[in-house]
Image (cartoon, grey):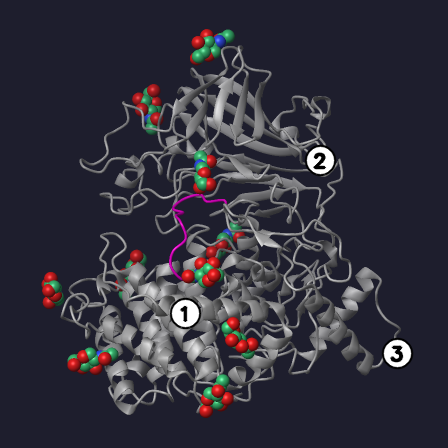
Amino acid sequence: MAANYDTLNTHPRNSPYGSGDPYYNESSGYITPQRPPKKTISKWVKFGIPVAIVVIAAAVLGGVLGTRGSKNSSSQSAAAAATSAISVKNDLGHFATATDSQYLLPIYPMTTNTAAFTTPTFVSTTNTNLAWPQDPFQPSNPSPTQVRSDRPRIIAPSYMWEALPNLINNDPYLSGWNDTIFGNASQYMSLPPVVYFLDGGNGILDPAREIKQRVKAFSYVYRLTNDTKWLDRTYAELQNAAGNLTGGWGPANYTKWNPTHFLDTAELTAAYAIAYDWLYDAWTADQRSSIMYTMIEYGLSNGIIAYSGNDPLAFGWWTNNTEGNWNCVCNNGLTMGALAILGDDTTGTAAQLLSMTIPDALQNCALAPSSDGTWSETANYWYFGTTGHAEMASSLLTATGSAYELTTVNPDFELTGLYHMYVSGPGSLFNYGDCGPNKYSTTANAMMFYGQQYNKPQYQLFQRDQFDAADPWSMFWYNPTVTGAFWDGLALDYFFDNSTDQWGSMRSSWTDENALYVAVKAGTLQGHQTHNDLDCGDFVVDALGVRWFGELGSGNYNAEGYFSSDAQNSERWLYYRKMTEGQNTILVDQQNQNVLAAPTIKHDSSGTVQGSSTVMDVPSDSSAYFVADLSSAYFNSTTFSRGVHLINGRKQVLIQDEINTQGTVMWRAHTNATVSLSADNLTATLTIGSATTTVQLLNPPSGAQFSTMEAVRFPTDPAVPAGNPDQPNDGVTVLVISLPAGSYTLEVLINPQWPGMSSSSYTTPSSVSLSQWSLTSPS
Ligand SMILES: *[C@@H]1O[C@H](CO)[C@@H](O)[C@H](O)[C@H]1NC(C)=O
Ligand SMILES: *[C@@H]1O[C@H](CO)[C@@H](O)[C@H](O)[C@H]1NC(C)=O
Ligand SMILES: *[C@@H]1O[C@H](CO)[C@@H](O)[C@H](O)[C@H]1NC(C)=O
Ligand SMILES: *[C@@H]1O[C@H](CO)[C@@H](O)[C@H](O)[C@H]1NC(C)=O
Ligand SMILES: *[C@@H]1O[C@H](CO)[C@@H](O)[C@H](O)[C@H]1NC(C)=O
Ligand SMILES: *[C@@H]1O[C@H](CO)[C@@H](O)[C@H](O)[C@H]1NC(C)=O
Ligand SMILES: *[C@@H]1O[C@H](CO)[C@@H](O)[C@H](O)[C@H]1NC(C)=O
Ligand SMILES: *[C@@H]1O[C@H](CO)[C@@H](O)[C@H](O)[C@H]1NC(C)=O
Ligand SMILES: *[C@@H]1O[C@H](CO)[C@@H](O)[C@H](O)[C@H]1NC(C)=O
Ligand SMILES: *[C@@H]1O[C@H](CO)[C@@H](O)[C@H](O)[C@H]1NC(C)=O
């Protein structure tokens, strides 16, 4: 796999930071100097960037920004500059002033602070009030079974705990997160141990994750206070999950941690691993041995069975051919558990497991992001998958000195941080496919780890203002020398064009919650771990702080056949939220799209980048478009291409469809808005709260007009399996254009009613065929 690195990089990628990106080279793509392809790991990968690279980056930055100091500036003044950059940042405190109450996204002050909101950078300093010291454990020949001699081993070695109080005192983010974690731990302390709850489709995953979350917080607070009440409370939680408290917990046999839904087993194993390792010196010998044997009995032994390939309950399916979150989460839990007890475990289980989990994760988990960084499942599963991947890589690095290529075997893994940034709109995710509400203890804090591993300060800057950033992992993955603003120099648009994904992300600002955001996808309909919908052409539109056209999200995971397969005749495609009817695209003959779709796309962008200010002034000629030929997604010689164009300085959106088919045509888009139609049915007025957007059908073909429908299946659709009704889609209306078979161009213009924008400032674009689209036409 590593051998593919050069081949894949022969196609230069666009840097979203434009030509100012110090980590990007026009001909070779991203520069990731800290990734020596073959060697296991180099000494400085963990924390701290090699001095040479910082110097080069600083020189590039200086050149680009014209801020380079005098050539003979001494290293002393460089150190002073570094300290000063950090103090500018620290004086400012948190960038985000608040969190949006509906979506919990950061709200940035509308201001310019050119001293602080500058190019994302890790500044170079050895001042241990400001930066992590180097890990003293630097084995020259790392091996998965040769662990460091001191505790903890996992994610946060003792040298980091020693440095932490000083760093907390000098960094507003670390300080804020520390307070929140203490607060969270106190809150959990007052609750009874987590109650066993078996939910058909999700097993005991929620309780398992809640236990892990609590154990992390309790262990963290114990280590910073030495107050034994936290130790005792941790032990109560562990005994509870072992079934040793009154009333028991789950079955009284080896399936207690529900290995048939192995995620549950893995998360509980991880919880035990953290408690065992972080509190190692505080446990009595008896406690330690109880924790270890319970973990082996209900966790690690089941891992061995999963890998044996002949378990009667078939709970190891995720070990093979599963490039997604399951493989990451399951291998991670087993790896953390094994690392925690290595040396104490006389059964050989831990060492045996490490010889299985690491190679398996390299072949599966690590390949979950495709070559453009898109997580192959969905934007939501990115959270689970990257959390598992980052925990596993970080645990291996700290415990043994190497991540064994888990972060590098897929040379494009680092792009998955960009994927996360671009799939996040000003309100919420581009939530195509299975995308549900947040789950216990799942955060985007892998962004902190990836920021450090891949030398991408922007990932840390993006994540640190998010509501979920306060987490013990962030305390150790965050590099407090990070300065600047993630948006400074960041392109408004990015196109992810691997054939499995093919989607575009276009917006008018990175820092305005009312910004325009349009995301649209093509891509294949298979190869997504059966988490996708039949949704070629699907799009979302955000503006004015709300989502105008959106997704219905996950169906009922417990419904019969929901995950049966992604073949054309799968029962999954009987459910409204998964079938083509439930998407924002064109339906032909009321039939699902062809699962063998292989769309092609073209796209372009003015390359507009945001500057230092959080107030984004969009140039009037700034635009972007995405066009997909979706013909292969339809049967019976239908041809269909869809284009999406931002026009008028990103204030309006044109969606243009060119279709020729022998089946009936139905343009559909789902909205939470109240919809009212004009007398001629050519303009739809959408309102959500006090915000309004108009949607116009331009140059309507004969008979074309808007109508509305409920977001429910057609009576003529094939029935769902008995007893498995679709969920209601309360408050959702489908805006529809219905036409008989024929050849049409449909031009739908979306005009958010921006405050202060007069009606004469809205453009009616000229008609231009998709084949002739350019950045300036239509306009
Ligand atoms: C962490 O937060 C707790 C609770 O607010 C506080 O008591 C403690 O002093 C903080 N730790 C450091 C090192 O500042
Ligand atoms: C942790 O505390 C913060 C601040 O009080 C709160 O917003 C958050 O919901 C808590 N997190 C959890 C998981 O309880
Ligand atoms: C907790 O105990 C450890 C080990 O004895 C010690 O190094 C540390 O300073 C103590 N921390 C506090 C806050 O008392
Ligand atoms: C484990 O115990 C549960 C509950 O008592 C029971 O349903 C299940 O069959 C048992 N499993 C095995 C493999 O013995
Ligand atoms: C739970 O109880 C069993 C049976 O007494 C014991 O073997 C095991 O070590 C205990 N586990 C924990 C975590 O207390
Ligand atoms: C792994 O999965 C592939 C594809 O599904 C299959 O061909 C292969 O036999 C499986 N290997 C094992 C060891 O189960
Ligand atoms: C898409 O990504 C996969 C890796 O997930 C890679 O094997 C394939 O070559 C990529 N395709 C293109 C067209 O880049
Ligand atoms: C409706 O609003 C919810 C909550 O914001 C969002 O998750 C969903 O995607 C929206 N649905 C549509 C059809 O826009
Ligand atoms: C293809 O067209 C034929 C004739 O109109 C129709 O019977 C059939 O259902 C169509 N197939 C699909 C998959 O739409
Ligand atoms: C507009 O749509 C309504 C409801 O479908 C319909 O009654 C009306 O006749 C349509 N108006 C025109 C001008 O077609």
Q: Earlier in the sequence, mark 1 or mark 3?
A: 3
Q: Earlier in the sequence, mark 1 or mark 2?
A: 1
Disc 1 target residue:
186
**Quarter of the figure with residue 218:** bottom left
Crowdedness near tag 1: few (<14), some (14–19) or many (≥20) residues, C-alpha within 10 Å: some
C-alpha distance separating marks 1 and 3: 53 Å
C-alpha distance separating marks 1 and 2: 49 Å
Residue 162 rendering spot, x and y as whole percentages: 54, 85
Crowdedness near tag 2: few (<14), some (14–19) or many (≥20) residues, C-alpha within 10 Å: some
| Front position among marks 1 and 2 | 1
Instruction: Identify residue type, mark 1.
Output: Ser
Q: Secondary structure at mark 1?
A: helix
**Quarter of the figure with residue 532:** top left
Residue 120 rendering spot, x and y as whole percentages: 68, 63
Residue 311 rendering spot, x and y as whole percentages: 18, 67
Q: Quick check: is 239 in the magenta stretch?
A: no
Disc 3 target residue:
72
Q: Secondary structure at mark 2?
A: loop
Disc 2 target residue:
649
Q: Mark 1 near mark 2, Cβ–Cβ under 8 Å?
A: no
Specify whether tag 2 is near ligand 8 (CB below 8 Å).
no
Q: Which mark is residue 407?
A: none
Which residue is pictured at 70% across the width and 49% down the height? Answer: 110
Crowdedness near tag 3: few (<14), some (14–19) or many (≥20) residues, C-alpha within 10 Å: few
Q: Earlier in the sequence, mark 2 or mark 3?
A: 3
Magenta residue span: 430-441
Q: Quick check: is 438 in the magenta stretch?
A: yes
